[in-house]
Image: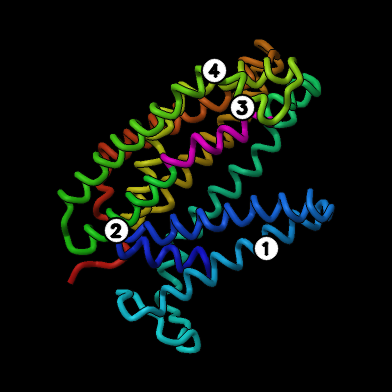
Amino acid sequence: LYNAGAALFRAQGNSKISMMSSLVMNVVNIGGNAILIYGFGMGVMGAATASLVSRMIACFTVMFLLQKPDCALRIDHLTDLKPDLDLIRRILKVGIPAALQMAVTAFSNVFVQSYINSFGEDCMGGWTAYVKIDQFLFLPMQSISLAVTTFVGQNLGINQVARAKKGIRAGMLMAVACTALLMVPVLIFAPQLVEFFNKKREIVDYGSMLLRLISPFYVFCCINQIFAGALRGAGNSRTPMFIMIGSFVVFRQIYLFIMANYISNTIKPIALSYPAGWLLCSLITALYFKFAKWEKHRVVDIE
């Protein structure tokens, strides 16, 4: 309910509601963890309870605001919500490929982890710290990609192709700028960032090395994220799904197998499997975006 409600606000061009509710959710979650885990000694049960309560608060907040009179996409009564089979079919046509791509990619990371685990506990600890910071670095480009999806869908829906393309260019510039801006302090303060998670010297060394090795490639990742968002906005979710699964899953596993067994089974070339997949995905996505008539793939034909 929370994600559906936040999506309705984003569709109106109002990202502030979803941003504020997400901020409240995270503040409540962090505060609840501190109180329930350390204050009341509830352990894992405290963490689970804090997560549940924070999500419930965010959900109720969004659903309450959707019922305000000045809301453009207002829900007067929750009991009025009824399924529309034709709309459900259209939503699934766009949503299932995107969800499948994310699920398969996430599952494939388990195999990457298995290679990392072979280098010992210190490397595993450094990799864990890197992954946590990686999620923070990815957030701006993924958020802008969502905005591009909405913007492209709205403009293609009223036959404003030129404006949709202009929005894609603006989204690309913003994603690259935000990512580059965040990358600078990460490169400079990598050891200090890793120490937030573990102060053991060997783990800090591994984590700092991984951050400084991989972080510069995030700029290239903006290409596949923004173009994939634009394609989904045009109603074409299958193409980015195939490209991303091929790059992040199939190619990455082939790369890891060849590297580990025939070239160099050391941490740096293994870790570079991530940038290698991003670069391949960005290249294929950019070529498709340039030469294919992506703007013709619309969920709703213009009458």
- Residue 300 vertical placement versus 180 (above, below): below
Residue located beneath label 2 in the image: 153
Q: Which residue is mark 4?
A: 212
In screen coordinates, is 263 left or right of 294? right
Q: Does residue 115 appear in this view?
A: no
Secondary structure at badge 2 equals: helix
State if disc 2 and disc 4 touch (CB < 8 Å).
no
Reading the chain from its start, which is encountered first: label 1 or label 2? 1
Check residue 171 for magenta coloring: no
Q: For residue 254, which numbered disc appears in the image?
A: 3
Q: Is residue 289 visible in this depiction of the protein?
A: yes
Give the Cα separation between the discs numbered 1 and 4.
35 Å
Mark 4 crowdedness (10 Å alpha carbons): few <14, some 14-19, many ≥20: some
Assess whether mark 3 and mark 4 are in contact (beta carbons under 8 angstroms).
no
Q: Nearer the viewer, residue 300 or 215?
A: 215
Q: Nearer the viewer, mark 3 or mark 2?
A: 2
Q: Amino acid at mark 3?
A: Ile
Q: CA distance from mark 4 to mark 3?
A: 24 Å
Q: Is residue 138 magenta?
A: yes
The secondary structure type at the circle numbered 4 is helix
- Check disc 2 and give the amino acid type: Gly
